[in-house]
């Protein structure tokens, strides 16, 4: 287990002049939600998530060492990068990358020695409540670690992935859960060995067969920009009247869902996951200022899922992130039956009848 100090890069020679790497990193969907954070992207409560497979960001990082004739003080003065999104310059993304580089500079001091071209794209709509910041920052962190490994070839695989998760967290908290593993825990929890506030860790216990290849069909109720950013939403937990109870609830629910993932109790899984989703939105509705991020169609979908589950005894449930879209979760064995239900009754409530079929995945993958 590595500490924060272990992640400080201390090699002073940069022998790599130019090159490129490319990684894909998936989004993830939290089962027990992280909502509220302390300084330096430390979570106020632990969380656990399913890593997705199809919803991902693909990022290529090209780099070239800055002109050695430039004065050293000038070389180190600024970060230098160009940012392309889907092949086109995306100026409004640059401040977020700039802030990310500033946060991680102490751990990656080599960044100012290179000019970067960051070329990124998503397989899903950006800023639509499918955690594009999580997949985007995870993919960028993996590329940065590939550069660091080129500078330090003796780096271990464990160090590579833990530091990547650590760096990703500093860009977007939930990004640390998109590095490795199909079920990932982030945040210190007494019942989970190795859990940390600094990075995500792969769920170490054997997962019951009921949850293998679990399905997530994402109903795109609203593909527009989120009404409130995640950063603003997390900040609303400071001095929230129900924050203490919420954080205690998250610890309790994480203990419960740990047992569920091991014993395969889908009925209990459904109770925890749906309660967590509704609690997340209840916290936003009772903050000051308050927000209602779910839409009428979100509620209609939820009610239809409840009715279908009650009538057919099919183990389908929903969860939500901080937006209007609905993640429909269900076992692989029930896929055909539930997809037919979604097509017959739910896609009419999606924007332009759009939805994405996804499954549990395994984390980031190197392409180049």
Image (cartoon, rainbow, N blue to C red):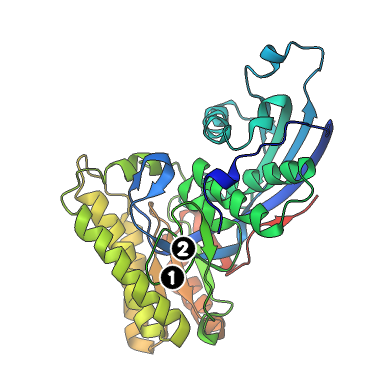
- The answer to whether 236 appears left or right of 80 in the picture is left
Secondary structure beneath disc 1?
Answer: loop
Residue 332 visible within the image: yes
Pick the residue in front: 278 or 272: 272
Residue beneath disc 2: 195
Pick the residue in front: 213 or 234: 234
Q: Which residue does the image show at 60% across and 49% down from the upper left? A: 163
Secondary structure beneath disc 2?
Answer: loop
Instruction: Indicate whether 327 appears above or below 24.
Output: below
Q: Quadrant of residue 97?
A: top right
Pick the residue in front: 205 or 301: 205
Residue count near mark 2 (Cα–Cα under 10 Å), binned few <14, some 14–19, many ≥20: many
Residue count near mark 1 (Cα–Cα under 10 Å), binned few <14, some 14–19, many ≥20: some
Instruction: Determine the CA span between mark 2 and mark 1.
Output: 6 Å
Where does residue 313 sit, x and y in percent of width and height?
A: 38, 89
Q: Which residue does the image show at 24% across and 56% down from the upper left? A: 282
Q: State the mark number for residue 296.
A: none
Instruction: Indicate whether 73 appears above or below 43.
Output: above
Where does residue 155 sit, x and y in percent of width and height?
A: 73, 51
Where does residue 105 sit, x and y in percent of width and height?
A: 58, 32
Q: Quadrant of the N terminus?
A: bottom right
Residue contact between numbered discs 2 and 1, judged by CB atoms under 8 Å:
yes
Residue beneath disc 1: 192
- The answer to whether 166 appears left or right of 261 in the picture is right
Residue 132 visible within the image: no
Badge count: 2
């Amino acid at each position: 287990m590595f500490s924060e100090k272990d992640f400080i890069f201390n090699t002073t020679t940069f022998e790599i002049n130019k090159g490129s790497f490319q990684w894909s990193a998936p989004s993830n969907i939290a089962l027990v939600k992280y909502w509220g954070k302390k300084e330096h992207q430390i979570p106020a409560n632990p969380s656990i998530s399913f890593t997705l497979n199809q919803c991902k960001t693909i990022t290529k990082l090209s780099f070239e060492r800055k002109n050695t004739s430039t004065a050293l003080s000038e070389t180190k003065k600024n970060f230098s990068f160009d940012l392309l999104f889907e092949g086109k310059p995306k100026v409004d993304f640059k401040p977020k990358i700039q802030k990310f580089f500033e946060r991680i500079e102490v751990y990656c001091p080599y960044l100012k020695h290179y000019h970067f071209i960051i070329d990124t794209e998503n397989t899903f709509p950006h800023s639509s409540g499918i955690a594009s910041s999580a997949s985007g920052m995870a993919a960028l962190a993996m590329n940065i670690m590939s550069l660091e490994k080129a500078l330090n070839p003796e780096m271990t695989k464990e160090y590579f992935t833990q530091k990547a998760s650590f760096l990703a967290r500093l860009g977007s908290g939930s990004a640390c859960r998109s590095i490795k593993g199909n079920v990932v825990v982030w945040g210190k929890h007494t019942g989970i060995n190795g859990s940390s506030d600094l990075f995500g860790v792969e769920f170490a216990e054997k997962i019951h067969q009921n949850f293998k290849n679990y399905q997530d069909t994402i109903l795109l109720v609203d593909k527009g920009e989120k009404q409130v950013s995640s950063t603003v939403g997390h900040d609303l937990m400071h001095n929230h009247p129900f924050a203490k109870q919420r954080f205690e609830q998250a610890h309790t629910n994480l203990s419960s869902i740990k047992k569920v993932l091991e014993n395969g109790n889908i009925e209990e899984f459904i109770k925890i996951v749906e309660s967590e989703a509704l609690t997340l939105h209840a916290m936003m509705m009772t903050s000051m200022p308050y927000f209602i991020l779910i839409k009428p169609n979100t509620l209609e979908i939820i009610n239809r899922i409840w009715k279908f589950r009650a009538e057919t005894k099919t183990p389908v449930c929903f969860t939500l992130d901080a937006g209007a879209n609905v993640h429909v979760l269900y076992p692989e064995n029930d896929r055909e039956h539930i997809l037919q239900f979604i097509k017959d009754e739910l896609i009419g409530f999606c924007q332009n009848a759009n939805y994405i079929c996804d499954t549990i995945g395994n984390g980031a993958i190197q392409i180049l």
